[in-house]
Amino acid sequence: QKARTLLRQEFDRAMAQFDALLCPTAPTPAFKIGELVSDPLAMKLMDVLTIPVNLTGLPALSVPCGFVDGLPVGLQIIGKPFDEMTILRIGYTYEQVAGLQAILRRPTAIAALLLT
């Protein structure tokens, strides 16, 4: 509980200067289907950037922001306490401005497998 309180204080200090914080959703692009299943630690490390936000109880949103080597990358938008509307507006605006709609609508890996 003490660690959670200290973490929240650090986020509150950072959030005092900004309406929202932007950071990657995961430290690396997504992995291929089945690639990390045999390594539970590697799977858990994919959540390392979202766990602190979850512990603080701050609102957060993840939006797709592109691809690296054909694998999706997410952008995490973190808001102030009880300010979900701001992060939803930022996420919506980002999706409109980024122009990724056509790219993101292509078939997913599962759909591609089913189509072959």
Image (cartoon, rainbow, N blue to C red):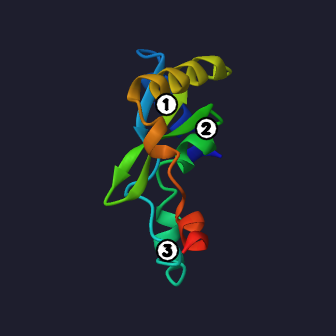
In the image, which disc is placed on residue 11? 1
Distance between the Cα atoms at labels 1 and 2? 8 Å
Relative placement, left or right, of 69 versus 35 is left
In the image, which disc is placed on residue 56? 2
Give the secondary structure at mark 1.
helix
Identity of the residue drawn at 55% across and 24% down: 92
- Compare marks 3 and 1 and give the one earlier in the sequence: 1
Q: In the rendered structure, are the residues bearing label 1 and label 2 in contact, judged by CB atoms less than 8 Å apart?
A: yes
Identity of the residue drawn at 48% across and 16% down: 19
Q: In the picture shown, does residue 61 fall above or below 71?
A: above
Q: Locate residue 99, reporting x and y percent.
A: 41, 30
Between label 3 and label 1, give the one nearer the viewer.
Answer: 3
- Tell me if mark 2 has few (under 14), some (14-19) or many (20+) residues whose alpha carbon lies within 10 angstroms of its own: some
Q: Residue 69 sits in which quadrant?
A: bottom left
Residue type marked 1: Phe
Q: In the picture shown, does residue 100 fall above or below 110?
A: above
Between label 2 and label 3, give the one nearer the viewer.
Answer: 3
Residue type marked 3: Leu
Identity of the residue drawn at 48% across and 61% down: 46
Q: Locate residue 94, reporting x and y percent.
A: 45, 25
